[in-house]
Amino acid sequence: MAGRHAVVIGGSMGGLTAARILIERFARVTVLDRDELPDAVRPRRGVPHAEHGHALLLGGKQKLEELFPGIGDELVTRGGVPFDPGHDLLMHQKGALRRRFRSGNQGVSLTRAFLEFTLRARIAALPGVEIRDRTAVYGLTGTPGRVSGVALANGETLPADLVVNASGRGGAGADGWLRSLGCPAPEVDVVKVGVGYTTRLFHRRLGERLAGDGLLLLMAGAEGDKRAASVFAVEGDRWMVTLGGWHHTHAPTDPAGFADFAAALPSKAVRDIVLRSEPVAGDIPKKFTFPAAKRRRFERLRTLPAGFVALGDALCSFNPLYGQGMTVAAQQAVALGHALDRAGDAGTGMARTYYASVAKIADFPWQMAAASDFAYPETTGPKPRGTHFLNWYTGRVLLASHVSVPVNRALMDVQQLLAPPTAVMRPGMAVRALLAARRSPSFGSTDSP
Ligand SMILES: Cc1cc2nc3c(=O)[nH]c(=O)nc-3n(C[C@H](O)[C@H](O)[C@H](O)COP(=O)(O)OP(=O)(O)OC[C@H]3O[C@@H](n4cnc5c(N)ncnc54)[C@H](O)[C@@H]3O)c2cc1C
């Protein structure tokens, strides 16, 4: 046992995975959320992003399986759509579709609200865990060296040996809470991307597949084109269509404007679904804007308080277009378990180990996202070292993925956070990718040598 009581601020993806880890190491875990948590699969105020396309990467599904055995099958039994990412996920990038293949892996496509609801039911059933909704945290209690609990908006205080801040992107509030205790707050890296999502639901006919024979599609515009789109078959026989892009290339929310945006896209699959399918009654296009990716650099702080860590978007909020957030949050939760086991308590040493390890976990997805984001001159912020080369090389690998199954397979594993980036950088793979890139139908037109 690392302590008697752990408090988690936020009952969303980060908070739920953290609670699963903590209950094995604390006698009691209390999860606090300011929202009323619905007893059915429904959107809620505190997670407006949940109404937009959420891909659970295979790396994330794998971690969730470790934490919640049998969760993949449960999600499919309850209506999630199983798919092979090599075969059923169409990737339209750099002006062409990537080469399909049978990967032998199974992903599950679903809405974010459905995933969260299913995990919440699992957590609520664990002895020793209490989920308190309609309970907003207002601040931290303690001294400059130790956080000893949370102060609630209703005036109550809850003592804890460990407080995990999983309150999402708005977790910035916790910086003020730390400062008011006399603890330093971290530097924040901000990469401005100006991303916008507009999402609408359509009916999916029994067994219906996308043009090109997929169940899911991700589209990013060719060189200089800032548009992006996704179509996911999700539970309830629906297509979830998200349109938008980088740097204020956003799709309108009026149905006619949404359809016009889709009609002008270079993907037949997106056009067909939006222009030919029946919209779900009562569902209108909804918009979410994401101005900037943010990474709080706790690992750079010289002093860290005992009894406190940040996790999920409160620690690192990635550009959502790469679908990494939920996977990285689950990986962070696992890292928190390891750090607690190593330290044996929730002291400063544990926090130091945890932040060092989650910095490593975030480095690659952060760099991968930043490299693509900095392809647009409008992107501002700290550019990770090597971005220019990485961008050039990734461009070649993407071109190669149009024609080469081995390259596409390796790239898919890296993007799904199943394999390290070295999987596409080994000398043999690099030679194969550079040669294959020249055979892409887009070679020369989108990315001249
Ligand atoms: C438009 C969009 C699309 C995305 N698509 C994907 C995707 O395809 N794949 C993927 O893996 N990730 C995706 N993400 C990222 C993913 O949604 C986040 O990484 C994930 O939600 C992080 O979960 P979290 O628990 O850290 O934060 P959140 O989901 O933001 O949850 C924070 C929780 O804290 C609660 N809270 C906040 N303040 C308080 C307080 N003071 N007191 C009590 N409770 C509080 C809120 O009510 C909420 O429940 C996307 C994000 C966006 C914005």
Image: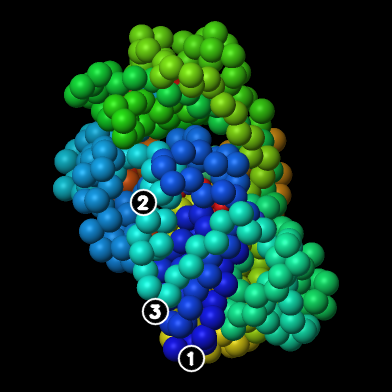
Q: Amino acid under label 3?
A: Glu
1 or 2: tag closer to the N-terminus: 2
Q: Camera-side residue: 101 or 390? A: 101
Q: Camera-side residue: 96 or 334? A: 334
Q: How is the image coloured?
A: rainbow
Q: Disc 3 on helix, strand or loop?
A: loop
Q: Tag on residue 243?
A: none
Q: Residue furthest bottom?
A: 344
Between label 1 and label 2, give the one nearer the viewer: 2
1 or 3: tag closer to the N-terminus: 3
Q: CA distance from mark 1 to mark 3?
A: 12 Å
Q: Amino acid under label 1?
A: Gly
User: What residue is shown at x 26% (from left), y 43% (from top)?
Assistant: 78
Q: Is residue 245 left or right of residue 222?
A: right
Q: Is residue 87 left or right of residue 127?
A: left
* Residue carrying label 2: 118
Say whether residue 121 is visible.
Answer: yes
* Residue carrying label 1: 344
User: What residue is shown at x 60% (from left), y 87% (from top)?
Assistant: 347
Location of residue 108 with respect to 167 vertically, above or below: above
User: What residue is shown at x 54% (from left), y 8% (from top)?
Assistant: 256
Location of residue 46 with respect to 196 vertically, above or below: below
- Density class for disc 2 (Cα within 10 Å; few <14, some 14-19, many ≥20) is some
* Residue carrying label 3: 24
Label 1 CB-ligand 1 distance < 8 A:
no
Q: Amino acid under label 2?
A: Thr
Q: Camera-side residue: 447 or 239? A: 239
Q: CA distance from mark 1 to mark 2?
A: 31 Å
Q: Disc 2 on helix, strand or loop?
A: helix
User: What residue is shown at x 30% (from left), y 21% (from top)?
Assistant: 204
Q: Which quadrant of the figure contains the N terminus?
A: bottom left
